[in-house]
Amino acid sequence: MLLFLSVPQPRPPGARTRAGAARVARWRRLRLQQLQRLRGLLRVLRGRPEAGTRRRGRMALCGQAAGAASLPSELIVHIFSFLPAPDRLRASASCSHWRECLFYPALWPQLRICLRVSPAEQPRLEFLMRKCGWFVRELRVEFAAENYLSGGGPGDGGGADTGTGGEEVEALQLSARWLEVLRTYLELVLCVLVSIRNNRNLQKFSLFGDISVLQQQGSLSNTYLSKVDPDGKKIKQIQQLFEEILSNSRQLKWLSCGFMLEIVTPTSLSSLSNAVANTMEHLSLLDNNIPGNSTLITAVELERFVNLHSLALDFCDFTAEMARVLTDSNHVPLQRLSLLVHNVSVMHKSLDNMPNDEHWKALSRKSTNLRVYIMAFDIKSEDMLKILKPSIPLERIHFDSYITCVSGAIVDLISRQYDKFLTHFILMNDVIDTSGFPDLSDNRNEDPLVLLAWRCTKLSLLAIHGYTVWAHNLIAIARLRGSDLKVLEVTEESIDFDQGELADQDVDPVHNLIEQVSLGLGQPWHAVMDIESLSVFTEPNRHFYREMQSFSEDI
């Protein structure tokens, strides 16, 4: 509206004649009325009634008393288009007519929803999806189950008994929470899929299910699922709905499904028509729960996706044959490749079929802009040595472990092989005993992390938790990379000091560390005090999925 008002107006016709002067005056009065009308409308939208009007929001339009409900729907929708989503929702509370205009398709081309797996979310989700599910063009849904893992979750009757049988009571309460999480999760997934089953305008579809984290920790087994869905009808219905959405789609360019509970099957992609598969630009299928040696996509199926710019798969599913398919002349050059290496997949699937160094060289020749993002969950060092081929254009790597620690040799290998590409390096070890973090610099002349900062000149993000980082090495890293290192996140418990630094009574070692690192980076810096505030440490799955999305979009 402000842009409309600021546009220079043309000279009124007949301004130089006496008769023209009257027309000019009349023209100016009309312009003034239009301005007053628009200003009154803006006051109503901001919740401030115009002077001289009643508090219930009546305003004068063209000399007549008219309510907000009398405005044309097209005008209301046009005004709503300039408002952010929260303000649209507030404005829709003015009257039923405005509330109907709120869900005009042009106002909601995309929906990004993060849902707690809670029964309270279901009615709100049903209302939103009923209004927008049939026309939304971009839909991203994330399910978060972490709120149910605490002691205050559903089925928790308070603190666990400390007497005889206390552990059994706590186990029963935990079991009840898992059952409710699963039951609610299935209902929410069904609600989303049912609402978009006939949406032919869907262009981007992304699903993330945090419930898979429970599976990886072994807390959620088929026993729980059989209790919630004993005959498997809901799981089968979810799978059928997902395939129906794929078969009905006509404009789908982006399909991403990560860590969902048995929603994607090895036959799901066959539901896509050849026309849609040929124009697909991004494909992400991340699910380490597929039994046996079965995969979500084969090399033969991948041949249909000739226009892929970005791809995200389980590393064990990305075979040498797939690499050969992507180098074919009928495929466009691949720009982004995200790979998840999980110990569960490595245990059940073989690494023998993975691409060798020659395959990576061919991929790099096919696309000089190809960049790779790898996340490794609890992978042994000997397996990582097999995976990290020299010709991988590795830009980002994220290590997350609960049992297996990354060795200094692996960090040194990464700094030597990928010094031209590496920008993000995340090293996390979620150990229970914080008194004995592994030291990567043991028996080495130089700290591998310092060498990483020295060799990798494009390094812009470094995050460390659960590994010993000596204060003088942290200062050296900051000085080596300077302002180019945009993010340096190291948890407070990971930082250690030399005895000489602690013995110096004239200098506070902590204050000196903060000062020196801040000077080296050229910006204020401090250690991470609360690990719960950073998703990269507390929610590695969600962090990887979101980073993979932005990594794939940034082409």
Image (cartoon, grey):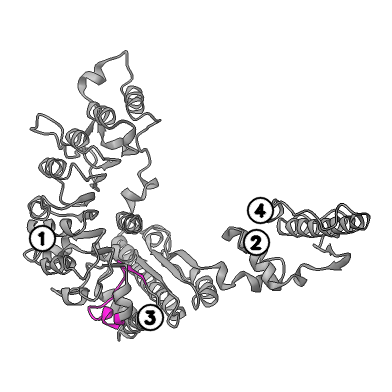
Distance in Å between CA atoms under marks 1 and 2: 55 Å
**Residue type highlighted by circle 1:** His
Residue displayed at 67% across by 71% down: 74
**Residue sitting nearer the eye, 515 or 170:** 515
Q: Residue drawn 15% across and 42% down? A: 411
SS at circle 1? helix
The residue range painted magenta reads 253-274
Q: Is residue 153 above or below residue 72?
A: above
Look at label 2 and name its amino acid: Arg
Q: Which residue is mark 2?
A: 90
Q: Check disc 4 and give the amino acid type.
A: Leu
Measured Cα–Cα span from mark 4 to mark 3: 41 Å
Is residue 468 shown in magenta?
A: no
Residue situated in front as seen by the camera: 515 or 491? 515
Please tell me which residue lies in front, 9 or 69.
9
Q: Position of residue 243 (x, y in %)?
A: 33, 82
Whether 257 is among the magenta residues is yes
Q: CA distance from mark 2 to mark 3?
A: 33 Å
Asked if residue 536 lies left or right of residue 24, the reply is left
Question: Nearer the N terminus, badge 4 or badge 1?
Answer: 4
Give the residue pinned by disc 3.
245
Residue wearing tag 1: 359
State the SS at label 2: helix
Residue 227 point in image, percent of width and height: 31, 79
Residue 96, compared with residue 30, is above or below; it is: below
Quarter of the rendering occupied by the N terminus: bottom right
Quadrant showing the C terminus: bottom left
Closer to the N terminus: mark 4 or mark 3?
4
Q: Name which of mark 1 and mark 2 comes first in the sequence.
A: 2
Residue at mark 4: 3
Tell which of 241 and 271 is nearer to you: 271
